[in-house]
Image (spheres, rainbow, N blue to C red):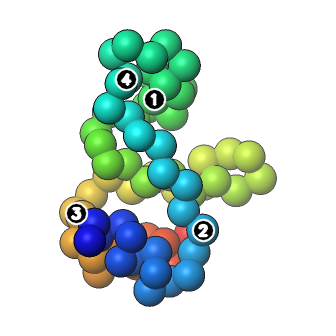
């Protein structure tokens, strides 16, 4: 099971997944990644009041992802 799924289950936080496989052929997806400066996949964004409140593109261990979710 992917670490994000395990971390989400442990925290109970709501997570929305965006499949970025077609970034080069999908202009809307490319615009989304450009707007939020997403260079690396996976990247986690935490939104507050419609704005990015936190961004995480660090280590992908379950513990680190879980910590990000808990803090955001």
Q: Which residue is mark 1?
A: 33
Question: Looking at the image, can residue 44 be seen?
Answer: yes
Q: Earlier in the sequence, mark 1 or mark 4?
A: 4
Q: Which badge, 2 or 1, comes first in the chain's sequence?
A: 2
Where does the image place residue 8, in percent across and percent down from the top left?
Answer: 46, 75
Question: How far apart are labels 2 and 4 at the CA level?
Answer: 24 Å
Badge 3: residue crowd in 10 Å (few <14, some 14–19, many ≥20): few
Residue nearest the observer in this picture, 5 or 55: 5
Q: Earlier in the sequence, mark 2 or mark 4?
A: 2
Residue at horizontal 27 percent and vertical 58 percent from the top: 58
Quarter-of-image position of residue 60: bottom left
Residue at the spot 35% in from the left edge and 77% down from the top edge: 6
- Image disc number at residue 59: 3
Residue 38 x, y percent position in the rendering: 39, 35
- Disc 2 designates what residue? 14
- Give the left or right position of residue 22, taking residue 26 as reference: left
């Amino acid at each position: 099971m992917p670490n994000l799924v395990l971390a989400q289950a442990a925290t109970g936080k709501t997570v929305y997944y965006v499949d970025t496989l077609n970034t080069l052929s999908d202009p809307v997806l490319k615009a989304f990644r450009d707007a939020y400066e997403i260079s690396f996949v996976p990247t986690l964004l935490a939104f507050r009041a419609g704005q990015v409140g936190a961004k995480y593109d660090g280590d992908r261990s379950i513990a680190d992802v879980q910590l990000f979710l808990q803090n955001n």
